[in-house]
Amino acid sequence: MKDRAIITVPSHPKYLSLVRDVTARMGDLFGMTESETEDVKLAVDEACSNVIKHAYRGDIGKKIVVKIRLAKKRFEVTIEDNGLKADEESIKGRNLEDVRPGGLGTHLIKKAFQVYAFDLRKKKGNRLKLIKYRSENGDKGINS
Amino acid sequence: METKVSTHRGVNVLSISGEIDMYSSPQLRDELMGLIHRKVPVLFVDFANVSYIDSSGIATFVEGLKGIISYGGTLKFIGISKKIMEIFTFTKLGKVFKIYESFDDALHSA
C-alpha cells in the first residue's frame, strides 16, 4: 500500500476545509514542521480555489480530485479538474508591491512547493502537479 | 467563521472567529463593507480567534482598507497570531495594514 490519500470533492467552497484538513494531516505524516504544514495547507487550498474560480468559473456542481502522495524525499500533490484550461498568464499573480485585492494565490502556492506545473498531456481540464522536497530541518516522518 | 460587531470605548470593533476562506469571505465582506458604507471613522478588526486566512480573506481586507481610506477613515488590526502575521508579511501587506498587538496599543497609536 503506497502512502497516499485521494479525495474527491464537489467544486463548492464549503469543501475547502475538508481538503485543508486532509492536506495538513498528510503533512504531519510526512513529518513537516508546523510552519511547513501551514504553508502546504494554504497552498493546496489556493490551488483548489483557483479551480473553482477559473476552471469552473464558480460552478459548484463539478468535481475536484486531490491526490497526495508521500514519497521518500518528496510530498506530491496532484489536483485534477475537468474545467476550462488554465490560463497561466491570468493566474500567475500580481506584483506583490502592487497592493490591490486578488493575485496572491499563486505566490502562496509557490512559497510552499518547489514544483508548480500543469501536466499538458491532460486533454480535458487540468492536472496541476505540486512537489515539495523534503527539507533538511523538518520532515522526519513516515518515510524517512 | 463567525463575526461580531461591537463598540468598545467608543471604537467599532469587528471580531472574527474561525477560518476565513473562499467559503466564508463573502460573509466577512458583507460585514466589513457594511461598516465602511456607514463610514465608521475608526474600525478595529480583532483577529484573536482567527485560525486561518487565505488569499480571498486578504483580498477582502485590501478592499476594505481602500474603502475606508477613501473617506479618511482608519482601519486597524489587533490580535494577529504569528502564523497569520507570516502570511501578511510574505504578501508584503504587513506594512500596508496598521497592525497592533492589543486594543490598547491600537487605541493609543496615531
Image (tube, coloured by chain):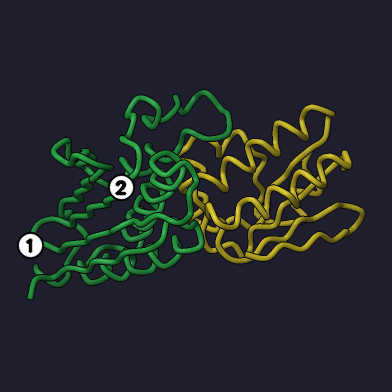
Chain colours: A green, B yellow
Q: Residue at x 47, y 46 (%)?
A: B87
Compared with A140, B35 (above or below) is above
Residue B90 position within the rendered picture, expressed as x and y whole percent measured from the top left? 44, 40
Q: Quickly name the residue at label 2.
A: A82
Q: Earlier in the sequence, mark 1 or mark 2?
A: 1
Q: Position of residue A128 (x, y in %)?
A: 24, 45
Name of the residue lying farthest toward the bottom:
A1
Q: Which residue is mark 1?
A: A72
Q: Which label number is shown at residue A29?
A: none
Q: Nearer the viewer, mark 1 or mark 2?
A: 2
Q: Residues within 10 Å of mark 2 (few under 14, many from 20)?
A: some
The quadrant in which residue B36 appears is top right
Which is nearer the eye, A96 or B9? A96
Residue at mark 2: chain: A
- Inspect the image, locate mark 2, and give the three-letter code of the amino acid beneath it: Asn
- Left or right: B78, with B94 as reference point: right
